[in-house]
Image: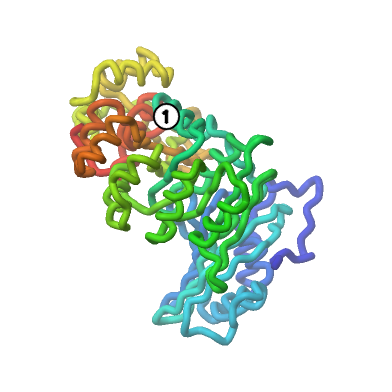
């Protein structure tokens, strides 16, 4: 599928930086040109770094929103009179949706080429509403390279723990947290790091978002019974060293993953829980025995994507009396002092940065204004944020943790022990990066509960 049209050709004078695709989108809406609407909409999504596009119907008008850096913003409104034409056009072009079926949700996975000649994949879904159908498209920019582990910002002891887990010859490494938190990127980066000529890597994905050299990547097919569990069975007959299964969502897949780990394979997968520690409860509820977890689990990662403070309009502000700041400091109250000192050193945090945060109570905060002209910041367009950064917590299955599992300790007790001794959770990882001026105070507690260490 391609939404590109011949009405627009880029030349030397027309670069993505000189073309206002938003104006072109508005013009195509005024002209009711459905083809160009999709051309410019997808191009805007890719060029502005959007992850999702929402095409939404309402009583008196319809609108299009795009999600940038995790936050939705309205792109344009358009008359309801041609909303059905937009949805029908997409269904026809996709070749995977029935244009005449408006009562049921429909899915499609299609490829497209933007006006800037970039190849993208779209995961699209239509949803019947009380008015008309809503269309949401998730963008996978195939032109983006898989980042290295260093580029992901896995710093300090978290980096050392991950490096150790990737060097294990067998066992299970899980990545958890909600959709859109970057789990896919982290898994691909891990696989890329250990992708050597002497190892055989087999993956079972849904969907295959990035085609990587020297990996045996397989797309599961639920409609014909090719599931994650059946794929794992097949993988064991493919002489694998490393297996990646996209998601553990049922007991059968979990049991197959554990069996694979017990028979000498390194297994990567994802699971949906609210933290790395809560994965223990989730896995036990799925039917696993604690001794099997102790024998197979190496590492559980939890992660989120946070908006970075715009470096062009950021300034230092005093936050000493802010309740969120006081909570943030308390997270280290019961943390091992030597471990804290080693963490600060390993992350390259300077004495000045430590004093600014812990003693003086200063922190980076966006202004939305250019520091020289005091006009709206041209980098972040006044939002105060530009780009996103990964935050990580690593639940390392050390010998102490495995003994606690065998002793039937609760996830709460295990988590408390880990936090007191070595674990850098999302809140602590954020604090270290905030000390370095990369994140601000308001962003973290939108997603993470305040704790006291």
Residue 425 is drawn in which quadrant? top left
Colour approach in the figure: rainbow
Q: Is residue 141 visible?
A: no
The location of residue 313, given as percent across then percent down, is 45, 33
- Label 1 residue SS: helix
- The residue shown at (66%, 62%) is 111
- Residue, x 41% and y 55% (percent of image)? 255
Residue 222 seen in render: yes
Q: Which residue is drawn at 79% across and 57% down?
A: 9
Left/right placement of residue 325 relative to residue 82 reads left
In the rendered view, does 377 fall on the left or right side of 355? Answer: right
Q: Residue furthest toward the bottom?
A: 100
Q: Name the residue under label 1.
A: 161
Residue at the farthest top position: 351
Residue at 47%, 81% in the rendered image:
104
Along the line of sight, the residue nearer the viewer: 95 or 255: 255
Quadrant that contains the C terminus: top left
The N terminus appears in which quarter of the rendering?
A: bottom right
Comparing 75 with 131, the one in front is 131
- Please determine whether, in this image, residue 255 is positioned above or below residue 331: below
Is 332 rendered above or below residue 294? above
How would you rate the neighbour count of disc 1 (Cα within 10 Å): few for under 14, some for 14-19, many for 20 or more? some
Count of numbered tags: 1
Above or below, comparing residue 452 to residue 39 in the picture: above
Residue 159 % position (x, y): 45, 28
Residue 271 appears at what percent x and percent y?
40, 52
Q: Nearer the viewer, residue 120 or 149?
A: 149
Q: Is residue 60 left or right of residue 421?
A: right
x, y percent for residue 179: 43, 54
Using residue 397 as the reference point, say whether residue 238 is left or right of it. right
């Amino acid at each position: 599928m391609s939404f590109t049209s011949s009405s627009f050709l880029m030349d030397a004078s027309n670069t993505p930086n000189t073309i206002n695709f938003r104006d072109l989108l508005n013009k195509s809406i005024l002209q009711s040109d459905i083809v160009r609407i999709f051309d410019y909409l997808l191009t805007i999504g890719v060029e502005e770094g959007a992850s999702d596009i929402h095409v939404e119907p309402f009583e008196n008008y319809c609108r299009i929103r795009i999600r940038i850096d995790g936050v939705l913003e309205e792109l344009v409104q358009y008359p309801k009179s041609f909303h059905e034409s937009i949805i029908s056009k997409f269904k026809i072009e996709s070749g995977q949706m029935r244009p005449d079926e408006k009562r049921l949700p429909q899915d499609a996975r299609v490829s497209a080429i933007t006006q800037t000649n970039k190849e993208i994949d779209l995961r699209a879904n239509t949803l019947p509403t009380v008015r008309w159908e809503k269309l949401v498209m998730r963008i996978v920019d195939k032109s983006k390279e898989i980042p290295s582990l260093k580029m992901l910002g896995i710093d300090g002891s978290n980096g050392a723990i991950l490096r150790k887990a990737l060097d294990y010859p067998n066992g299970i490494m899980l990545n958890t947290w909600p959709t859109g938190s970057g789990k896919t990127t982290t898994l691909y980066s891990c696989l890329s790091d250990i992708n050597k000529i002497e190892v055989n890597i087999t993956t079972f994905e849904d969907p295959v978002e990035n085609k990587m050299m020297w990996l045996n990547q397989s797309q599961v097919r639920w409609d014909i019974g090719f599931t994650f569990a059946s794929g794992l069975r097949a993988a064991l007959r493919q002489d694998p060293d490393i297996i990646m299964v996209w998601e553990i969502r049922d007991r059968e897949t979990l049991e197959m993953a554990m069996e694979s780990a017990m028979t000498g394979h390194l297994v990567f997968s994802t699971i949906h829980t609210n933290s790395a520690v809560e994965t223990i409860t989730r896995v036990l509820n799925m039917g696993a025995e604690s001794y099997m977890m102790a024998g197979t689990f190496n590492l559980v990662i939890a992660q989120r994507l946070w908006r970075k403070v715009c470096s062009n309009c950021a300034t230092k502000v005093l936050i000493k009396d802010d309740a969120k700041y006081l909570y943030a400091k308390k997270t280290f109250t019961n943390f091992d002092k030597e471990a804290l000192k080693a963490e600060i050193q390993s992350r390259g945090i300077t004495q000045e940065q430590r004093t600014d945060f812990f003693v003086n109570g200063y922190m980076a905060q966006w202004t939305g204004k250019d520091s020289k002209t005091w006009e709206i910041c041209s980098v972040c367009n006044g939002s105060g944020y530009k780009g996103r950064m990964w935050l990580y917590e690593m639940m390392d299955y050390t010998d102490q943790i495995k003994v606690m599992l065998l002793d039937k300790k609760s996830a709460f007790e295990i988590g408390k022990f880990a936090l007191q001794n070595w674990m850098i959770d999302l809140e602590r990882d954020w604090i270290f990066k905030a000390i370095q001026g990369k994140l601000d105070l308001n962003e973290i507690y939108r997603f993470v509960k305040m704790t006291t260490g």
